[in-house]
Image (tube, rainbow, N blue to C red):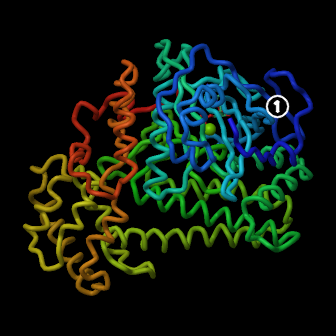
């Protein structure tokens, strides 16, 4: 395979001198060299051609995605000539507690390529043990790999910053998993996904050096990250590190706003799952809001405190940034500028969130106005189970001069129990609609294009939890057509696709409490 390999991470940062693949604490190094495990019988299930193009993978049969070479390289069977695969060291706060060294326990970096002046790192997830595998096997199962592959690409096409997914390959090996952590282990099909992003560095990569008071290597990693991925930072010394935190905060803010816009719940916002580039990373027990609910989390492991619930994502992002600020403090030795950045995050989040919600409502305000209208709407959406995606998408069909009856008709499909729309609930909706009409009257700048602009921020199609599960159930039986169907559907999430209207529907009742549809654990 003829890729333009251009490694930097494993060239410019310190390596773990030990070459054996034994589980251990690794100090004063950013990575350890590892070789992916050779799968028994790899089989390509799906590939995103677009991602292949980003990397410069040719379209031809002989060298492209359908080639033997591709299958070997991206399943881990063959190491690319000139590459030097490795696993990264990182630590992290898991569910609010410092967990010490974690690291790439089942992710193996194949290397970096530069194509069309853009740097991409390629990483296999599920390609076997590394020094960071701790108690686990380094493998991934088909169901979680399908979820990662489909969701990465769906998020990209929704316009949410994310890592990408090149390929989904069955390994032909069996993997033992206790899916709901309830003592019922079973063998499942193993799979490998190749993720692609400019860099896979996480908050935790910096945290591990700080936790060990290894300021020298911390600084090396920050300098490296700025040099390649924050090229607009031109200052030096302390200013440079302050700007770095500021940029990371801005990128993180943007990512969270986008999550809230589309109703995505990450599920495990541990600091080791926070990309330093502000990309959505590590698709595990994530989920999509169906009924709009600030308190919802798909992650059963988080059922107790629901730390990572939808409505808490901005709070946790700020908490995670505080942990990063504590790390950067070692290089800045001054708290004030870092505190200012964290305070602005809170303020800017509020304004940006309101602006984003205004857009969802077809209002052009960009000064954080209409707060009452928005907080009231959020309250209304909780009154009776209301599908987020359908509500906002269909709201675009409501006109300023419409009557309440027209409005109710337009959004009717979003309610799980229409019959609950009576009494005070009905009255409250009438009140809200009256407020909305006033807002529309006062803000007519979108004019005729209001519907079109709303449709650009309110997706018609998202990867509803049960949809991913249907793809998984079919794939388990050897039918990969649903994966392809959903992949194609979600490439144009804002377009009307009349022949695919079946996916613009509320979650069916069978999926309400089904494992995989509404309940997911970290087991993957
Ligand atoms: P996660 O909760 O998936 O973000 O993972 C937390 C940590 O556990 C990371 O260091 C992962 O690399 C590691 N990990 C998760 N699953 C496995 C596995 N099957 N084998 C080895 N390490 C794993
Ligand atoms: Mg992780």
Quarter, ligand 1: top right
Viewer-proximal residue among 36 and 222:
36
**In the image, residue 336 above or below residue 322:** below
Q: Position of residue 9 (x, y in %)?
A: 80, 46
Viewer-proximal residue among 53 and 120:
53
Identity of the residue drawn at 55% across and 73% down: 347
Q: Is residue 417 left or right of residue 242?
A: left
Residue 302, visible in the rendered structure: no
**In the image, residue 435 above or below residue 33:** below
Secondary structure beneath dot 1 equals strand
Residue 495, visible in the rendered structure: yes
Q: Quadrant of the N terminus?
A: top right
Identity of the residue drawn at 39% across and 46% down: 288
Q: Position of residue 181 (x, y in %)?
A: 50, 21
Identity of the residue drawn at 26% across and 82% down: 447
**In the image, residue 152 above or below residue 259:** above
Q: Is residue 511 left or right of residue 162?
A: left
Residue 378 figure quarter: bottom left
Q: Position of residue 367 (x, y in %)?
A: 45, 82
Residue 21 figure quarter: top right
Viewer-proximal residue among 483 and 421:
483
> Label 1 belongs to which residue?
33
Residue 7 figure quarter: top right
Q: Is residue 143 left or right of residue 431?
A: right
């Amino acid at each position: 395979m003829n890729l333009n390999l251009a490694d930097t991470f494993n060239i410019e940062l310190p390596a773990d001198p030990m070459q054996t693949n034994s589980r251990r604490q690794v100090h004063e190094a950013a990575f350890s060299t590892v070789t992916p495990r050779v799968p028994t019988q790899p089989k390509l299930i799906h590939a995103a051609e677009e991602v292949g193009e980003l990397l410069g993978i040719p379209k031809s049969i002989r060298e492209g995605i359908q080639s033997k070479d591709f299958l070997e390289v991206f399943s881990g069977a063959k190491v690319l000539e000139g590459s030097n695969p490795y696993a990264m060291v990182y630590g992290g706060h898991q569910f609010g507690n410092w967990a010490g060294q974690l690291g790439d326990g089942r992710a193996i970096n194949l290397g970096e390529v530069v194509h069309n002046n853009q740097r991409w790192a390629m990483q296999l997830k599920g390609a076997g043990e590394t020094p960071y595998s701790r108690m686990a096997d380094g493998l991934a199962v088909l169901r979680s790999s399908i979820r990662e592959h489909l969701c990465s690409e769906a998020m990209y096409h929704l316009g949410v910053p994310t890592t990408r997914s090149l390929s989904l390959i069955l390994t032909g090996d069996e993997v033992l998993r206790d899916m709901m952590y309830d003592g019922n282990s079973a063998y499942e099909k193993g799979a490998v996904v190749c993720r692609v992003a400019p860099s896979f560095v996480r908050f935790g990569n910096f945290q591990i050096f700080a936790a060990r008071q290894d300021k020298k290597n911390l600084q090396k990693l920050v300098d490296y990250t700025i040099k390649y991925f924050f090229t607009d930072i031109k200052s030096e010394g302390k200013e440079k590190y302050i700007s770095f935190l500021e940029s990371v905060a801005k990128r993180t803010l943007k990512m969270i706003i986008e999550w809230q816009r589309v109703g995505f719940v990450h599920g495990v916002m541990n600091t080791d799952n926070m990309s330093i580039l502000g990309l959505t990373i590590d698709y595990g027990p994530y989920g999509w809001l169906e009924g709009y609910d600030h308190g919802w989390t798909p992650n059963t492991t988080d059922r107790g405190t629901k730390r990572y619930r939808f409505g808490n994502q901005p709070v946790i992002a700020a908490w995670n940034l505080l942990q990063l600020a504590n790390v950067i403090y070692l290089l800045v030795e001054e708290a004030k500028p870092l505190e200012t950045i964290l305070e602005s995050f809170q303020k800017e989040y509020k304004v940006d969130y309101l602006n984003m919600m205004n857009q969802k409502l077809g209002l052009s305000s960009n000064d954080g106005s209409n707060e009452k209208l928005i907080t009231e709407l959020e309250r209304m959406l909780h009154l009776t189970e209301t599908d987020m995606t359908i509500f906002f998408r269909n709201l675009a069909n409501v006109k300023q001069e419409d009557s309440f009856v027209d409005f109710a008709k337009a959004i009717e499909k979003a309610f799980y129990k229409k019959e609950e729309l009576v009494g005070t609930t009905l009255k409250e909706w009438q009140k809200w609609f009256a407020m909305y009409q006033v807002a529309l009257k006062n803000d007519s700048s979108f004019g005729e294009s209001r519907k079109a602009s709303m449709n650009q921020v309110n997706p018609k199609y998202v990867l509803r939890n049960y949809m991913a599960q249907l793809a998984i159930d079919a794939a388990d039986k050897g039918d990969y057509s649903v994966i392809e169907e959903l992949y194609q559907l979600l490439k144009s999430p804002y377009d009307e696709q009349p022949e695919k209207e079946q996916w613009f529907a509320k979650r069916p009742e069978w999926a309400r409490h089904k494992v995989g549809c509404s309940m997911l654990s970290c087991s993957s």
